[in-house]
Image (tube, rainbow, N blue to C red):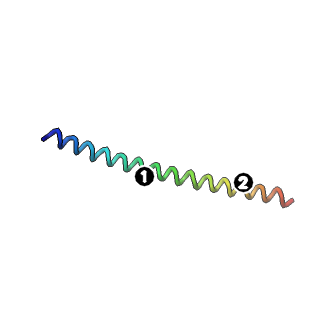
């Protein structure tokens, strides 16, 4: 019975670690999307500036 309890505890810890990794991954993805959107905005502004002259 101890083996089963140990396995359940290990599974619970692994699940918590997985959740943390998934949350971190979501944050990184969100940051990357914001950066890409910001870069596209900057590029658009540069193109606009160049063509206005």
Q: Secondary structure at mark 1?
A: helix
| Residue at the (37%, 46%) spot, across then down | 18
Report the residue marked by disc 1. Answer: 23
Q: Position of residue 36 (x, y in %)?
A: 62, 52
Comparing 53 with 29, the one in front is 29
Please identify the residue farthest to the left as the structure is shown: 1
Is the C terminus in the top left, top right, bottom left or bottom right quadrant?
bottom right
Q: Is the residue marked by circle 1 packed among few (<14), some (14-19), or many (20+) residues within 10 Å?
A: few
Sooner in the amino-acid sequence: mark 2 or mark 1: 1
Rendered view: 2 above or below 22: above
**Quadrant housing residue 2:** top left
Q: Secondary structure at mark 2?
A: helix
Residue 3's mark? none
Q: Is the residue marked by circle 2 packed among few (<14), some (14-19), or many (20+) residues within 10 Å?
A: few
Q: Is residue 31 left or right of residue 21?
A: right
Is the N terminus in the top left, top right, bottom left or bottom right quadrant?
top left
Q: Is residue 41 left or right of residue 25?
A: right
Q: Position of residue 17 (x, y in %)?
A: 35, 46
Residue 43's mark? 2
| Residue at the (23%, 45%) spot, across then down | 9
Question: Gap between marks 2 and 1, in whole Å?
Answer: 30 Å
Q: Is residue 27 left or right of residue 34?
A: left
Asked whether the beta carbons under mark 2 and mark 1 sit within 8 Å of each other, the answer is no
Q: Position of residue 21 (x, y in %)?
A: 41, 47
Count of marks overlaid on the render: 2
Comparing 11 with 39, the one in front is 11
| Residue at the (42%, 52%) spot, across then down | 23
Please identify the residue farthest to the top as the structure is shown: 3
Please identify the residue farthest to the right as the structure is shown: 53
Q: Position of residue 16 (x, y in %)?
A: 32, 49
| Residue at the (56%, 51%) spot, across then down | 32
């Amino acid at each position: 019975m101890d083996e089963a309890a140990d396995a359940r505890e290990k599974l619970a810890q692994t699940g918590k670690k997985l959740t943390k990794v998934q949350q971190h991954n979501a944050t990184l993805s969100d940051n990357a999307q914001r950066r890409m959107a910001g870069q596209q905005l900057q590029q658009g502004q540069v193109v606009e500036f160049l063509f206005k002259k």
